[in-house]
Amino acid sequence: MTENPLPPARPSTSPARRGGESADLKVVGKPLPKVDAATKVTGRAVYADDMLPARTLHCKILRSPHPHARILSIDTSAARRIPGVIAVITGADLPIKFGILPVTQDERALEHEKVRYVGDPIAAVAATEEEIAAAACDAINVEYEVLEPVMSIDAALQPPKDERVQDYGGPNNVHKFVALEFGDVDDGFSRAEHVREDVFFFQGNTHLPMEQHSAIATFVDGKVTLWSSTQVVHYVHRALSKVLELPMNRIRVIGAAHGGGFGGKTDPFAHEIIVAKLAMLTGRPVKCTLSREEVFYAHRGRHPVLMWVRTGVTREGRITAMHFRSALDGGAYGSYGVASTFYTGALQTVTYDIPAYRFEGCRVFTNKPPCGPKRGHGTPQPRFALELHLEKIARDLGLDPVDLKRRNFVKPYSRTVNWLRVTSCGLEECTERVMNASGYQDRTRRAGHGMGFAISSYMSGAGTAIYWNDMPHSEVQIKVDRGGITVFCGAMDIGQGSDSVLASIVAEELGLQPPDIRLVTADTDTTPIDLGSYSSRVTFMAGNAALEAARKMRAKLVEAAAAKMSRDPADVEVTDGRIGDLSFEEASILAEARFGTLTSAGSYTPPKIAGPFKGSGVGPSPAYSYSACVVDLDADARTGLVRVNKVWIAHDVGRAINPLLVEGQVEGSVYMGLGEALMEEQAFRKGLHKWPSMLEYKSPTFLDTPEIETFIVETVDPEGPYGAKEAGQGPLLPVPPALCAAVFDALGVWIDEIPVTPEKVVEALRRKEKGEPARYGPPRFPSIPYPPVIKVEPPPKDLDAATAAI
Amino acid sequence: MRREIDREVERVVLTLDVNGEKSELLVPVHKTLLEVLREDMQLTGTKHGCELGECGTCTVLVDGKPELSCLLLPIQIHGRAITTVEGMASGSELHPLQQAFAELGAAQCGYCTPGILLASKSLLEDNPRPTRDEIREALAGNLCRCTGYTKILQAVELASGRMHD
Ligand code: FES
Ligand code: FES
């Protein structure tokens, strides 16, 4: 085993602003409005589809009507003859493959050989009017050889009738296998006094951002500029460079105001590449805005996952070993799927102390829109399975489920058996808060009423980048110029408030207020790198980079001010717009005179803490957030309808840089978790989406969303900026299992399948009445030819000693 | 199914009264109010999420009542008073609803915000002190994917309190 010493956690704050002492913080911790609040409420924020430069051409994309077919020929001649059509392109114009992960470069902006899902792009038109572009798409003649589609996990495990969906991966239509074992699982099971197995299914669902994806490109002076509603300008930049065969310095990607992502705008998309290519061909601005139906097919959302879990416990409910299996329905392309597969097995150990753990995962290709990352990426499904499984074990043992879970909570500052480094951990406090507020333990029993409890954890950014490199994950530059402060950072504000977080941190360090800070963000020409708004990484990583840059700038201002006042720099206070006795503006002029152009830079690279095994890059994070949740509901035994009365949620965010924004993230996560738990489904019939509209794809409205009471728990993480961790994803995770536990509490039936629709509840009750097992869920887990497990030694005990001392 | 492009698109001259300003426009007769506002008048504060009447994002007020601009043809509302989000503030002073949404973080990505602000404005004009359930009812046709609705409800209540104190 390689040496893997645990890097000591760095103190996150200077002696003057120590993490625990929030009293002297002037901006951090205050519920301030977002820096762009006025822009948003006046309708002045410019989203990609709001842009309409002179001579803009409109682009429409011809998409496959078949889930699986070979393309025999494409005839665009009739389309080209339509007046107003300026350019038509097909796959021959964009043959180079791309994809978000280096190992799965399997997509084309336009496919000319084979289509793999209904909606796969084939040709694109740029025309003077959108309707003309649409009519031209209709006039394109494509000849297909229709192939048998592969539509389920079971089918994908069998030999294909015609041919595989993709020509790489494992046997049949398997895309990816993972098989890992940490510690001695067989021994752990032999020591168990009770062993239980369960099977669960989590249906796929989609992000449904209110803004349809949109991109607009220009080509001027040999340079492509693309404005897009993307979460990751850097990855789009890389994909454009590859497919357009242009050096990155000839491409500029700018994140337009963003109308909601939730993971759905984290892949580079065909339409982004297409408008850039069409702009190059026509010399005019070209815009493409997806229709809502196209957004459903663009997808990259939650994977449907079938799960099997077997756990051994002592009589007291202490876990001795766990074996977890997952099978993911990946759809037609790789997307983030390799990472998603690992994620279905990675974070179980971050909440519960599991001394021996085996994980076998499998992702298959099917002829459906590709799945990818949605809020919680690959972890809400196993979280649902794990929490319900432990509920059932507790009942087998006659234990209170909350007690059983608590007995197994992971300890702060420890290493898990699969090498994940845990630092601050507020699980106990979060549990305490929701228990007290909800009255869960002394709930009154009434027919049809139930309460359920669950916990979760999520990463504050992935510890490794998507493509292998040693560069920082986030960089910030600050320029001070005659009193004006500009912060440059590649981070993309997708509504979560990352711009406000950057401004707050810089303002705090420079003794100013957030509105004093000008921001330039998410522009590959003018801002240094940030890997993007995914994986809950921005507050932690860009925040740390901003902190470093701001402190360097503060040191310059203080030095100049101290010289002027003939004082020791250590005695110069930076607060309330003043640097010692000087105004900020006076100090900045002195500093500029002393040092020349006033700039500073900071960057953040996550610590190298991954374990010594293949696949260890998925799961490590510099810090984990923790949540605990109680759902209170009424379930109608006659109709199967579930009505959620209230949700209590406590979230360990380390430190709330802005509690208003943290609450907003938590409330939004709970809402989205309820939507997934109760109604949202991305399901297909003969390759067609069953509900590709906002009316039919049910999502919670104002009337369906209950009161949500949020408790912010602050554990002040040693590595987070001011101790902050993530808030945008973790709080979604406990909601579906807490809801299912509450349904059991109310009606005595297990719904082991998400979403919990009325039909499933009624069916489970019917089975209960007939004396069958009182559950609705998958009857079995398929037999999957996982490869032999790779055995990994757990981390040495003394690794934990380094952190325990902190 | 094939769409045919009729090159002889019928165009009409319209007078639209938007935010108290009258403009004369020549537009294709089949263009929706949403398209005319955004494309012909550059009033891009009005957003869209479906263009099929399903999400409420494109809500504007017509004679003070919320309407889905993606389902309206301008010729249907010729001469009636249209209010968009651009017409909510007085000069650079925010409307109390806008102020409350900004203060409480009720706009995250902000994409649903214009429609929800206008629907709320109409509600508070009819019912200055709505209960939380009445607000839910009035806004039930407006989806928001970011906020979990909580801060929006609080913001409408805050504005209602301030406007009618
Ligand atoms: S755009 Fe969705 S209702 Fe009009
Ligand atoms: S704030 Fe993003 S959809 Fe409402």
Image (cartoon, coloured by chain):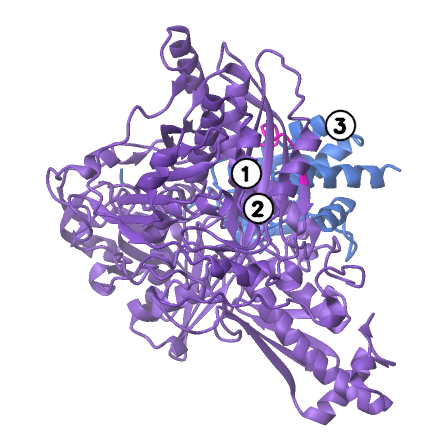
Chain colours: A purple, B blue
Depth check: give the residue in front, B88 or B108. Answer: B108
Discs 1 and 2 share one subunit:
yes
Question: Which dot marks residue A626?
Answer: 2
Residue beneath label 3, please? B131
Q: Mark 1 points at which residue?
A: A455
Label 3 sits on a secondary structure element that is loop
- What kind of residue is marked 1? Ile
| Contact between labelled residues 2 and 1, with CB atoms less than 8 Å apart | yes
Q: Is mark 1 on a helix, strand or loop?
A: strand
**Quadrant in the picture for the C terminus of chain A:** bottom right
Mark 2 residue CB less than 8 A from any atom of ligand 2: no
Using residue A83 as the reference point, say whether residue B164 is left or right of it: right
Amino acid type at mark 2? Tyr
Whether label 2 touches label 3, CB < 8 Å: no
Q: Position of residue A787 (x, y in %)?
A: 21, 47
User: Residue at left 22%, top 43%?
Assistant: A786
Residue placed most toward the observer, A555 or A367:
A555
Residue A413, position in %: x, y? 56, 55
Q: Give the range drawn in magenta.
A: A701-710
Give the dominant element type of the magenta stretch: helix, strand or loop.
loop
